[in-house]
Amino acid sequence: MIGTIRRHSKWLWWVIAALTIISFIGWNIAPVSRNGGVGGGGGYGTLYGQKVTAQDYASARNEFYLFYWFHNNEWPDSTVKNQDMDEQIYLRLMLTKKAAALGVSVSDEAAAAAADEMLRSLGRNGQSIPIDTFVSKVLQPKGLTAEDFERFARDDVVIQQLIQTMGLTGSLVTPQEAAAAYQREHQEVSAQIVFFPASNFVSQVAITPAVISQFYSNNMAYYRLPDRVRINYVEFNLTNYLAQAESELAKSNLNAMVDADYKYFGPDYFPDAKTPEAAKSKFRDAEIHKRALADARAQANEFATAVFNVTPAQSDNLATVAKQKGLTVQLTPPFSSAYGPDSSPALQVLIKSAFALTPDDPLAGPIHGASSDFVIALNKQLPSEIPPLDQIRDRVMQDYRTMQATVIAQRAGTNFAPALAGQLMSGHNFAAACIAAGLQPESLPAFSLATRDLPELGDHVELSQFLRLVASIPAGHASPFMETEDGGFIVYVQSRTPVNQAAVSTDLPQFTASLRRARENEAFNEWVQTEAGRELRNTPVYKQQAATGTK
């Protein structure tokens, strides 16, 4: 198929873009254990009555990597947690297997056209970048192949057809329904709000040793620490090799490489580069970084080989060889499989390998990160435990104080709501009623249900939750007291201003198309929720959820 890519010009990039909608939906399946990975112990599970093979999982993983790269221009290793990645891999695997079961397929021409447009999106002036350039500069450094790309392009077209089929009912939107929806979503709302934050009620919380002891006893399970691990590691960061890489490249063909990159990818590859010179400077930096990373990995490989050549295999071998080579060994604090080391985001890449270590197999590496390679050794395994109160007293006291302040705040809001309703019915002003009760009302800037940012809400309430509430409140009325994690709030809708009809006429066609797409995606997502809840029960992702009691 790759050989036919350049013969196709139909715009199919939407195949990829549409999947953004379903890429990170929640489907109530817990993350897979990182201790040994998805293949540890129970294999890879089954989907639609068929065993998921290691090759199935590897192919879906490679496709997810490509999906993420095309959307974010980076690989997911350092930005997506392992459990999230496992969820998405199994979700993609489920969709491709469902499509196959339904007989959904695409021609070589359609798949090639999709691949061509992906490459075209990376080029300039409507020209595709050469497939061999894409393979050598993007795929091969990550261990991916042209075949992975071909399968990814084909499966995305297949999944898009599945989206259209399962979301078909959502496309049935009449012009009248679209016009009413546009008015409802874009009419301007004037509103006021009063918050009941727990922080305002902390001073009312009484704390005694007996109360804290009882609170700790009642919530000991909450304070249980999970299985944790500490590891020693040697890091090979590319920044330590930049000067060497620049010097080596300067002796060869660095300028020619930069000119070639600029020609293939164009000045728009770096949006913040305003001039050709600035773009070339960034391409130059990219080539140097790539060479530095290669040098770092070569050193990591050499070091790892030396460590693994020492017998018998034991954790101390890492420090022994590191001392011989003048390298620094670092130690992580204890960390769990759910959160990883807190000391550096770059260390998140070590989680899966760290929890696979055992006293009999205490070494691993090199482990590839976005900008570093690591060789690691087991330092200590820490089993799950509940720390005694004396060790965590300050944390327990803070938790108790926050919980009680939240209860007091919510009680105050619940008591104020009916009194406010009575005053509004009597013709009193919302702000005046709040001030009389010792509260601080706030006027919100004009907004609509289509508003995507309302900073005045702060961290008190999610915007989507707030807008859903406002949609149900008639002008001149206040909401009931709405509880939140840090207390709660009451919102008062002063007025709604209808949308100008000229704006409706201008925007309605595009809005109608967007509404239909949104409804299609809603219908598809509902189907995915149901399908995943049933089919993913026989995969490690779901089994881990059941084992932890979070299902």
Image (spheres, rainbow, N blue to C red):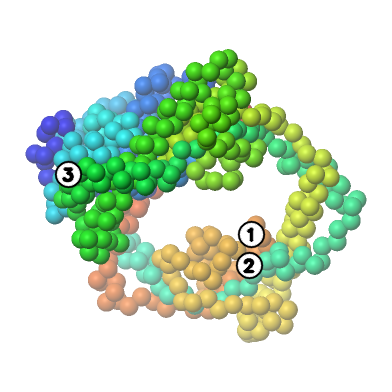
Residue 454 position within the rendered picture, expressed as x and y whole percent measured from the top left: 49, 69
Q: Quadrant of residue 296?
A: top left
Query: Badge 2, how many Cα within 10 Å: few under 14, some, many 20+?
Result: many
Q: Where 218 sits versus 173, above or below?
A: above
Question: Left or right: 495 with respect to 316?
Answer: left
Instruction: Identify residue for label 2.
Output: 489
Question: Left or right: 94 with respect to 423?
Answer: left
Q: Nearer the viewer, residue 396 or 103?
A: 396
The residue positioned 26% from the left and 51% from the top of the image is 283
Type of amino acid under label 1:
Thr
Circle 1: element type: strand
Type of amino acid under label 2:
Phe
Q: Which of disc 1 and disc 2 is earlier in sequence? A: 1
Q: Where 267 sits versus 197, above or below?
A: above
Q: Residue furthest left?
A: 7
Residue 346 position within the rendered picture, expressed as x and y whole percent measured from the top left: 49, 43
Instruction: Identify residue for label 1.
Output: 484
Q: Nearer the viewer, residue 448 or 474?
A: 448
The residue positioned 37% from the left and 26% from the top of the image is 58
Type of amino acid under label 3:
Ile
- In the picture, the disc for residue 129 is 3
The residue positioned 54% from the left and 60% from the top of the image is 462
Circle 3: element type: loop
Split into 4 quadrants, where in the image is the C terminus? Answer: top right
Residue 168 visible in image: no
Mark 1 and 3 residues: CB-CB less than 8 Å, in contact? no
Q: Quadrant of residue 425?
A: bottom right
- In the picture, the disc for residue 257 is none
Residue 125 visible in image: yes
Residue 431 position within the rendered picture, expressed as x and y whole percent measured from the top left: 63, 82
Q: CA distance from mark 2 to mark 1?
A: 8 Å
Residue 547 position within the rendered picture, expressed as x and y whole percent measured from the top left: 62, 28
